[in-house]
Image (cartoon, grey):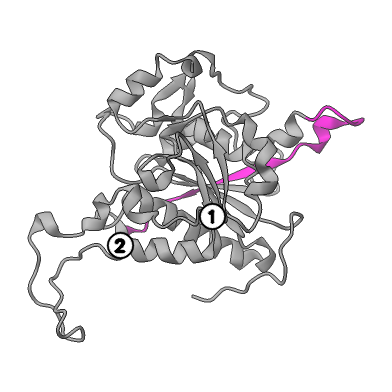
Amino acid sequence: MEFNEKTFSSQANFHLAGIVPIAGQDLDFEMPYPDCMLPVAPNYTMIEAAVVEAAFAGCDTIWVVCNDDIAPVVRHRVGDFIQDPLYFYNNIGPNPTGQRKRIPIFWVPIHPKDRDRRDCLSWSVIHGALAALKVSSKLSKWMIPDKYYVSFPYGIFDPRPLKKFRKQIKSKNNFYVSSDNKTVQDNYYCSFTFGKEEFIKYRRNIRKGTGKYISNPENINSIPTETLPLEERWSARFFELNQVFTDLNIENSEFYEASDFYNLADWSSYRDFMGTELAKSIKRPTKAFFTYREFNSIAKDT
């Protein structure tokens, strides 16, 4: 599928699309509700913290990749938009509240043909970026995302310092959040940005997974007839982050070392996090900044 590209890109028309992946293999929490709904503070969940992080990073739109079976309960916590903190906390001017900027939140389900086949958490990132590209390009070529910022619900740190790095995040160079010099390619749920070239490479890594049939390497044009055993089919649905997001361009990239980062990959790490100083100090944002709200229907005030 071909898309018209922008004639030029600058800070003024730079579109940073935030991707918050939820759909994918579950972690070992084994709760009756989605893992991303676990609290990190009173009345403050992982998914909400990921959306707030994307807002502080300067995302112009946020795309939550969430299947239809859990979307209603998750959307009831998040809503349709969040305030841009750069404008929300600006008290300069005669009417600072009138200059606030909303960041819209869109909900993207995994395509049915990919369900239970290659729908790992990494594929949610790739699918979310593709959905953002397709929808934006149909509106205008000027809305095509220049970069994608991935905010994982399972990587927790104080996102407020990201406001100082907005210029680096919204640039041609990739931006990586790291912890102890470890990034997403070390299987950490650290946030990062990627562009068109990285998208193609990451999607190619997903396609390395097995399918239903055994291919014949000696004759790639032959029609496969022999099927793989059930446990060996669709291996991509079990891919880890370090199997997809590989060969990062470290030398030409920007980094933010988050000293307070916690990788909530399992119950043990989540339990350790709840006893930290960050867990004691983190609070839910004010309702004026972020709470469940929906956009008004077209041609209606309420």
Residue at the spot 40% in from the left edge and 54% down from the top edge? 245
Say if the magenta span includes residue 103: yes
Using the image, determine if residue 296 lies above or below residue 36: below
Q: From the viewer's side, name the closer residue of 104 and 152.
A: 152
Query: Seen in the image, is 79 located left or right of residue 84?
Result: left
State the image quarter where residue 14 is shown.
Answer: bottom right
Query: In the image, which residues are magenta?
Result: 90-113
Q: Quadrant of the C terminus?
A: top right
Is disc 1 in contact with disc 2, using a CB cutoff of under 8 Å? no
Q: Which mark, by number, is residue 251?
A: 1
Q: From the viewer's side, name the closer residue of 87 and 202.
A: 202
Residue carrying label 2: 113
Position of residue 26 measured from the top left corner of the image (x, y, whole percent): 28, 39
Which of labels 1 and 2 is toward the front? 1
Residue at the spot 13% in from the left edge and 58% down from the top edge? 232
Kind of residue indicated by mark 1:
Glu
